[in-house]
Image: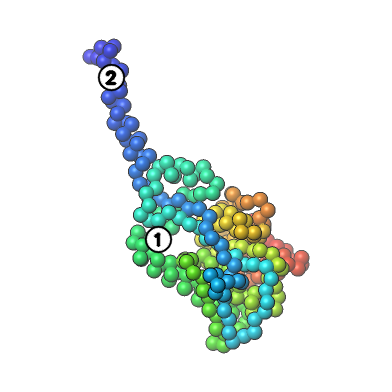
Amino acid sequence: MFSRLSRPRALAVCALPVVALLATAVFAPLPFSVAQPGLTADVLGENRGTPVITISGAPTHDTSGQLRMTTIVATGPDTRVSLGDVIDGWFATDRAVMPRDAVYPSGDDLREIEQYNVEQMEESQDAATTAALDHLGLDAADVDVTLRLADVGGPSAGLLFALGIVDKLDTGDLTGGRVVAGTGTITPSGKVGPVGGVPLKTQSARRDGATVFLVPEAECGDARSQLPKGMRLIPVETLDGAVDALTALRTGKGEVPSC
């Protein structure tokens, strides 16, 4: 039986393990990554002094405006992310907490991750080229397309690569002088797929001057959740639909989809 004097001491002693557990929970590494808005790049222009899109075997046309692919930057697979980091990320508008496996599906080895991202980018570029040339009715055997974008990996620039190729080869002007940004994977048949991190990408796009953002239709809700002021969302499911939407926006004829 504890006396009145010993009870507070006993409670204090019992509280020590609880405090230790809470401290461990706050500072222990968790299987998450914290992501932020990353760079954007105009696929119609140059990246580090080199054209992003180079085409031979078919006439190309001057373009106006910009088509900016977007990225996110995430903490590395070996970076400690604590409960405090996760809580901060949940309440921040310029950061997002994402499962580490969603950001790094190829594992924790940095070399394997880099190789995986390079392969994903190359597959995306091939798919974008096939989809764009098919959209235009051009034979891939006659037209050579080279895509170069340094320090960017993964498949999420596929839609913008395809639109850039179409814009350079077609006689129309897709952007109408606007700064258009977007994200989305693409298949060789021209189907657009979701990518993740869209709210952060809309922020980086607005930061770099975009007023229009092309978003995979399945991610409209995510994109609306933290949409920057002055940004117009256009949902897309296919390359054909994206071209039609931008043409309608430029000409004022036809319906422009909205989220």
Which amino acid lies under the numbered mark 2 shown in the image of this protein? Arg
Residue 157 is situated, as x and y percent measured from the top left of the image, at 53, 67
Q: Is residue 195 visible?
A: yes
- Three-letter code for the amino acid on which mark 1 is drawn: Pro
Give the camera-side residue of 131 and 58: 58
Q: Is residue 138 above or below residue 69?
A: below
| Residue 131 as seen in the image, left or right of residue 77 | right
The quarter of the displayed image where residue 18 is located: top left
Dot 1 falls on a residue whose secondary structure is loop
Q: Quadrant of the C terminus?
A: bottom right
Residue drawn at (25%, 12%), measured in percent from left and top? 3
Instruction: Check disc 2 and report its element: helix, strand or loop.
Output: helix
Give the labeled residue for mark 2.
9
Q: CA distance from mark 2 to mark 1?
A: 50 Å
Q: Residue at x 23, y 14 (%)?
A: 1
Q: Which residue corresponds to mark 1?
A: 105
The residue at the far top in this view is 4
Count of picture labels? 2
Q: Name the outermost residue toward the left.
A: 1
Q: Report the side of 13 relative to 59 (left or right).
A: left
Taking the spot 29% from the left edge, 11% from the top edge, the residue there is: 4
Residue 5: give x, y in percent of width and height. Answer: 28, 12
Q: Residues within 10 Å of mark 1 (few under 14, many from 20)?
A: few
Q: Picture coordinates of residue 11 (x, y %)?
A: 30, 21
Query: Of the numbered discs in the image, which one, if any, rests on residue 134?
Result: none
Q: Which is more toward the observer, 49 or 88? A: 49
* N-terminal label among 2 and 1: 2
